[in-house]
């Protein structure tokens, strides 16, 4: 647990759905910085949950911690990542096939999670060593899920319709905006979007147990139970959608 007394706070000028973002810097180690939405506690929680979900889906997730302020309130805090390079459907010409696949996975995931903010996808050097700027060696990550994880339906029967609709939207948009190449055309784009459904459909819910226990401890039992049921129903819905695409 990160404690406010050990950090200096810097408020960013830009304000979004999550209010003004705060950068907290460890007073004993200036390289240890975290990004927190202190003005929107619920959004900070969703940012934390999203990264734990991404990890449970077997993808690279941004390290995150719990942060307690001077009043004892707990927030989700994402580690500040240096060197992020934004990518998108119209800015992915130089990406490898694998990077394009991962980009589409994250964009589809963000859409399926009902993220009104759209989500953000980046290239990131995860090797831990300086890079000469070779994009091919960089991994793909995603953040800005503060408006996500709030699906309209909480029951799997109707959730399936939502997932189908979101998958259709992100697939159509991707087909429209992405440049088709010999090694990455219509089939690959459709498959990249469907990968989010596949992974959610076989989500190991036990990998979220620690996260849900923390949510109950810091945000209450009702909040934890809502998310627990949300992920159960999301998994069920995505499993059904995947089977319909076989």
Image: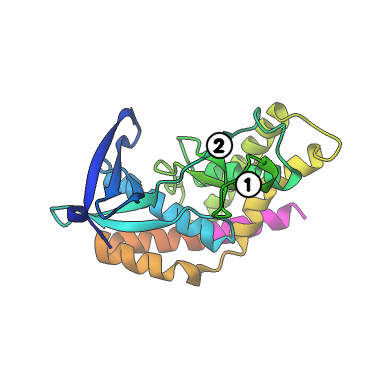
Q: How is the image coloured?
A: rainbow
Q: Which residue is mark 1?
A: 138
Name the spot of residue 97 as percent of width and height, x first. Answer: 75, 44
Q: Residue at x 55, y 68 (%)?
A: 204
The C terminus - image quarter: bottom right
Expressed as whole percent of the image width and height from the top left, the position of residue 126 reads: 56, 52
Q: Would residue 57 appear left or right of 4 to someone viewing this image?
A: right
Q: Which residue is mark 2?
A: 85
Q: Is residue 244 magenta?
A: yes
Relative to residue 186, is residue 14 drawn left or right? left
Is the C-beta separation of discs 1 and 2 under 8 Å? yes
Query: What secondary structure is found at the residue carrying circle 2?
Result: strand
Q: Is residue 106 left or right of residue 70?
A: right
Q: Residue at x 34, y 62 (%)?
A: 224
Q: Residue at the spot x=72%, y=31% of the render?
A: 93
Dominant secondary-structure state across the stretch colored magenta? helix
Quarter of the image where the N terminus is located:
bottom left
The stretch in magenta equals 234-246
């Amino acid at each position: 647990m990160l404690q406010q007394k050990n950090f200096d706070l810097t408020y960013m000028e830009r304000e979004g759905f999550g209010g003004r973002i705060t950068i907290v810097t460890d007073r004993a180690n200036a390289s240890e910085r975290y990004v927190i939405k202190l003005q929107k506690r619920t959004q900070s929680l969703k940012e934390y949950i999203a990264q734990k979900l991404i990890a449970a889906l077997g993808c690279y997730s941004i390290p995150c911690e719990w942060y307690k302020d001077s009043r004892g309130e707990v927030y989700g805090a994402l580690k500040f990542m240096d060197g992020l390079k934004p990518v998108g459907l119209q800015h992915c010409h130089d990406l490898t096939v694998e990077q394009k696949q991962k980009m589409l996975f994250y964009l589809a995931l963000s859409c399926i999670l009902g993220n009104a903010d759209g989500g953000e996808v980046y290239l990131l050097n995860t090797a831990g060593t300086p890079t000469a700027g070779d994009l091919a060696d960089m991994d793909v990550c995603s953040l800005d899920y503060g408006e996500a994880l709030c699906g309209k339906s909480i029951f799997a029967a109707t959730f399936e319709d939502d997932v189908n609709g979101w998958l259709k939207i992100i697939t159509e948009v991707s087909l429209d905006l992405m440049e088709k190449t010999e090694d990455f055309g219509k089939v690959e784009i459709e498959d990249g979007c469907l990968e989010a459904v596949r992974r959610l459909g076989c989500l190991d819910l036990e990998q979220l147990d620690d996260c849900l226990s923390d949510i109950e401890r810091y945000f209450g039992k009702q909040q934890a139970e809502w998310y627990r049921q949300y992920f159960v129903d999301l998994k069920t819905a995505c499993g059904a959608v995947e089977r319909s695409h076989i």
